[in-house]
Amino acid sequence: MPSYAQFNPIRIRSYILRLPLCTRLLLAAMVGLWIAAIPFPWLREWARLDPDKMDFTQMHRLNLFPIMHLNFLHLIFNMLAVTPLIERFEAEYGTLVTLALFTGPFGTLPGGIYVLLEKFVLRTNTSVMGASIWVFLLLASEAMKTSKTNPNFSIGPYKIPTWTTPLILVLLTSFVVPNVSLVGHLCGAGIGYLWASGYIKFLVPHEKILRWLETKLNLLGRLPHYVSVDQKTYGRYGVLPTTASASNLPKSPEPGQRLGP
């Protein structure tokens, strides 16, 4: 019998309240654009990724198309799918890295590849929008990490490589869900594989620069739900407030172990 405790609204509320800062900002941008598109429907045409309209005056589409959605159901399903993935990513890499990637390369790279494929290879003009491209990007990244400890999973007598899981989901989605972009989802997954393999991590500013910004602007002290880039030193949400001096605290006879992500 399935347990209904997992649907406890208190737990859902607690999870929402614990979402880190950049995840909140991205979700708020999705909801805000959807609300703005109700009285101004031309915003969808302005933000969607339309290959035939792409030129140097339309580069904003590469950044906006993942947070623009066609309708309410499209928005809700994408938010449910992408929220735990972005939250997990931000918990691992920090708020500054997440903000830099999701407002930049994680939109422009898969979007740019999609435009090139549509215009010069497939010779079609299929417009796309929605955060599902981020869903498959992050699923591909997670699958690559999981494959290091669990290279295969079994379906009957067959062993399936773990890293192929997002590709299987892309194919299933294209068959089950109408009006989805197979090529767009594959572009997102491709960037996820490149990120997890380390080939595009040079796009992230150096950790010393990010740490200097955090210290100079006192981001840990000023911004609630901010996740430090240097989690080994500060923990997930920075240094916890204390009234006792560290020098007066009793010392453990054994070395400590860092808890949490």
Image (cartoon, helix red, strand yellow):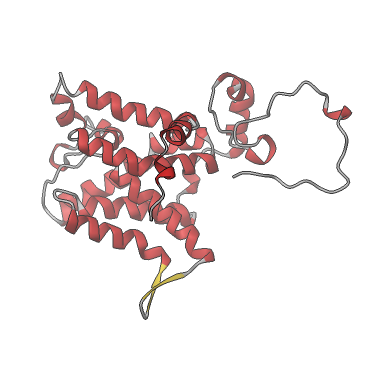
Which image quarter is the N terminus in?
bottom left
Q: How many numbered marks are there?
A: 0
Q: Is residue 180 visible?
A: yes
Position of residue 176 measured from the top left corner of the image (x, y, whole percent): 18, 56
In the shown orientation, is residue 96 left or right of residue 186?
right
Which image quarter is the C terminus in?
top right
Q: Nearer the viewer, residue 219 or 172?
A: 172
Q: Residue furthest left?
A: 124
Position of residue 133 measured from the top left corner of the image (x, y, whole percent): 30, 46
Q: Is residue 125 above or below residue 149?
A: above
Residue 129: quarter of image: top left
Residue 64: quarter of image: top left
Position of residue 39 measured from the top left corner of the image (x, y, whole percent): 15, 18
In the shown orientation, is residue 157 left or right of residue 231?
left
For image coordinates 67% across by 44% down, the residue present is 259
For image coordinates 34% across by 55% down, the residue present is 190
Q: Nearer the viewer, residue 257 or 3?
A: 3
Q: Is residue 199 visible?
A: no
For image coordinates 20% across by 38% down, the residue present is 49
For image coordinates 67% across by 34% down, the residue present is 234
